[in-house]
Amino acid sequence: MCGIAGEVNFNNILLTDEQQKNIIKNLKRRGPDADGVYVSENVVLLHARLAVVDIENGSQPMRYNYKGADFAIVYNGELYNTEDIRAELKALGERFVGHSDTEVLLRAYCVWGEDCLEKLNGIFAFAIWNEREKKLFIARDRMGVKPFFYVEKEKSFIFGSEIKALLAHPSVKPVLSYRGISELFFLGPGRTPGCGVFEDMYELKPGCCGVYDADGLKTRAYWTLEDKPHTDDLNATIEKVRYLVTDAIERQLVSDVPIGTFLSGGLDSSIISAVAANSLKRRGEKLQTFSVTYKDNEKFFKKSFFQPDSDEKYIQIMTEYLGSDHHNVVIGNDELAQALYDAVEARDLPGMADIDSSLLLFCGEIKKHVTVALSGECADEYEHTG
């Protein structure tokens, strides 16, 4: 995961160096490895990086001059079909400096414009500045895995990966409206799509993109879910599901840093771990798996129809089958309670209480061993542990 932020301002009032640093500081949890700044007459783009692919050449903000026009991108996410798009662009005459998906995404936009979104398979939130036309193009992935919050004021557009990054901007105030209070008390930990909770703050909706220029912000949906008749027989359905699941997992194993998986012994994590272990084995690598339990759990665990056995039994079965390098993280009640504050700070809003704090502590321990961990949490298609 990375953090992005920035501002387009047609009043010729740009963020000072100190203000830029303060916003980046609020994104460092997402991107602890490096940070960067792009400044032009009407725009400031900020990036905090978690380095996963092309450590040397993937730094951001990334710039590219295409047919005499300067473009700059800040991007948070991962494209799972990077090499497919790269091949298309090479056939059109594009030549690449590195092998990052950031470079591929920037070139794709330069060549195809907004139509590049039709080609993207991945999770992302990004902003691309066109210096010649003085416009910012923004987009968010189809499922809304990667966040993108923004505030539009007179002649300015402020955006960021997290609410706290926007609140670090001197023009954005932490004012709660009645709607914001309703979101917290009646819908929390969820939110109405597009709502940023604070006054005048919004979130770009999943599957949407937009352009901000001197005429203001215009957004549109570039993708919506469609239902179609299911015509495959049972065997064809089984094979198609097998292919889609395996392909989705293997495409997320592209990394220049160590990879692991969450493993609870349940169906989701076991499937992901099995596919990942087989894929890594073909590369001559061994999968690292991670599970979490709580101090004195064996003493207080009670069987039920919903959970007749504790996870440990199934975790052991899977680790023996996978031959993985397994790590079991034990969390105590005191540290779980203390981490509640950090969990709210990380989420920016009240969340799922001890579920959030336990996941935060768990990821902190995983980070000591790997940078990327695939999970079946459904909260994210994968979890970066930075």
Image (cartoon, rainbow, N blue to C red):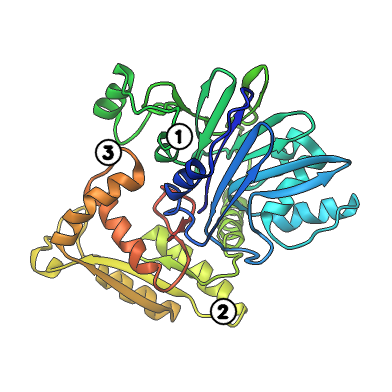
Q: Is residue 90 above or below residue 190?
A: below
For image coordinates 42% across by 74% down, the residue present is 369
In this picture, residue 313 sits left or right of residue 384? left
Q: Position of residue 166 (x, y in %)?
A: 45, 35
Q: Nearer the viewer, mark 1 or mark 3?
A: 1
First reached walking from the N terminus: tag 3 or tag 2: 2
- The secondary element bearing badge 2 is classed as helix
In which quadrant will I find the C terminus?
bottom left
For image coordinates 51% across by 62% down, the residue present is 33
Q: Nearer the viewer, residue 244 or 54?
A: 54
Find the distance from the CA under tag 3 to the CA under tag 2: 41 Å
For label 3, the residue is: 350
Q: Which mark is residue 281?
A: 2
Please report contact status of discs 1 and 2: CB closer than 8 Å, yes or no: no
- The secondary element bearing badge 3 is classed as loop
First reached walking from the N terminus: tag 1 or tag 2: 1
Q: Is residue 292 above or below residue 139?
A: below
Find the distance from the CA under tag 1 to the CA under tag 3: 22 Å
Q: Which mark is residue 169?
A: 1
Q: Is residue 151 above or below residue 297?
A: above
Residue 139 is drawn in which quadrant? top right
For image coordinates 31% across by 38% down, the residue present is 349
